Amino acid sequence: MNTDKGKHYRHIYRGIKVDPYRICQIYDMGGGPREHMTKKLLRGTSKGHDEMQLLDELQCSLDRWREMIKEDRMESDIDVALNIGAGESSMISGGVIPNPGVET
C-alpha cells in the first residue's frame, strides 16, 4: 500500500503536518468555499494546471460562493417574512417552502 499522501502533506513544523486542512483549521476558516479556495491557492499549479486553468477554477469557486450567500440571504428574508424562528424548519433545510426552481 502506498502511504505517500502527496507533497502537500509532507510539510512538517514542530512535529505537525502543515497541509491546507491544518492551515484552514489554524485560521478558523469555517469550511466550505474558503477552505476549497485556500487549498487550490496553496496547491497552485503543482498538479500540472496552468495559471489560466487555476484562475478559472478559482472563479468558479467564487461564483458558487456568491450564489450561496445570495441563497442564504433569500432563505433568511423568507424566514423573517414568514416569522420562522430559530429552531424551526427553514426553506433549504426541508421546511415549509420548497426550494424555488427545484421540482419536488
Image: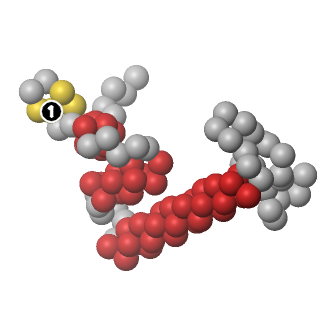
Q: Between 52 and 74, which is closer to the camera in this rendering?
A: 74
Q: In which quarter of the image is the N terminus?
A: top left
- Would you say 16 lies left or right of 59 here? left
Is residue 66 shown above or below 85? below
- Would you say 88 lies left or right of 7 here? right
Residue furthest to the left in view is 14
Question: Residue 40 at what x, y percent from top left?
Answer: 36, 57
Question: Residue 12 at what x, y percent from top left?
Answer: 15, 32
Residue 64 visible in the current orientation: no
Is residue 62 shown above or below 75? below
Is residue 63 shown above or below 104? below
> Which residue is found at the position 37% from the left and 76% from the top?
52
- Would you say 42 lies left or right of 101 here? left
> Which residue is found at the position 43% from the left and 44% from the top?
31
Residue furthest to the right in view is 104
* Quarter of image, res 5: top left
Q: Between 40 and 48, which is closer to the camera in this rendering?
A: 40
> Which residue is found at the position 26% from the left and 43% from the top?
27
Residue furthest to the bottom in view is 52
| SS at circle 1 | strand
Question: Residue 42 at what x, y percent from top left?
Answer: 27, 54
Type of residue at label 1? Ile
